[in-house]
Image: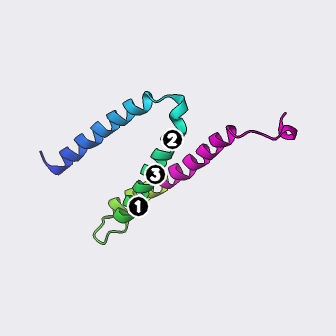
């Protein structure tokens, strides 16, 4: 097996495992899981920046790296906004704020 076949196998196994794990998560654990996936996505941002900025990167590599940076950044920011909104739902409101 060459390195591309190994990388494809790793990607497929990670995708399947990730899908199965997330599918079985209780709704009560959504916020901690969201925080964890945000941290993983932040690591993807760093990796995409490194790939995009490599000296010997081709145009395709730079284009895909740029797309990965944008997509991961959007994922991180929106994930934190959603998590913040969910956590605000659990805070008690003052009596004058209730409607």
Mark nearer the N terminus (2 vs 1): 2
Q: Position of residue 30 (x, y in %)?
A: 52, 36
Mark nearer the N terminus (3 vs 2): 2
Q: Nearer the viewer, mark 3 or mark 2?
A: 2
Report which residue position mark 2 lands on.
Answer: 32
Report which residue position mark 1 lands on.
Answer: 46
Mark nearer the N terminus (1 vs 3): 3
Q: Is residue 9 left or right of residue 31?
A: left
Q: Nearer the viewer, mark 1 or mark 3?
A: 3
Q: Position of residue 20 (x, y in %)?
A: 37, 30
Residues at marks 3 and 2, CA–CA distance in whole angstroms: 11 Å
Asked if 54 appears above or below 20 in the picture, the reply is below
Identify the residue at horizontal 49%, vertical 56% (top origin). 70
Residues at marks 1 and 3, CA–CA distance in whole angstroms: 11 Å
Quadrant in which the C terminus is drawn: top right
Crowding at mark 3 (Cα within 10 Å: few <14, some 14-19, many 20+): some
Q: Nearer the viewer, residue 3 or 17?
A: 17
Q: Quadrant of residue 61?
A: bottom left
Q: Nearer the viewer, mark 2 or mark 1?
A: 2
Whether residue 85 appears in magenta in the rendering, the answer is yes
């Amino acid at each position: 097996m060459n390195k591309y076949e190994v990388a494809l196998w790793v990607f497929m196994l990670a995708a399947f495992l990730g899908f199965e794990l997330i599918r079985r998560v209780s709704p009560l654990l959504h916020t901690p899981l969201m925080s964890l996936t945000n941290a993983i996505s932040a690591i993807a941002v760093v990796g995409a920046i490194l790939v995009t900025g490599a000296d010997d990167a081709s145009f395709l590599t730079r284009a895909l790296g740029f797309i990965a940076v944008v997509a991961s950044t959007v994922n991180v920011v929106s994930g934190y906004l959603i998590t913040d909104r969910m956590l605000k739902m659990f805070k008690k409101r003052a009596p004058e704020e209730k409607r």
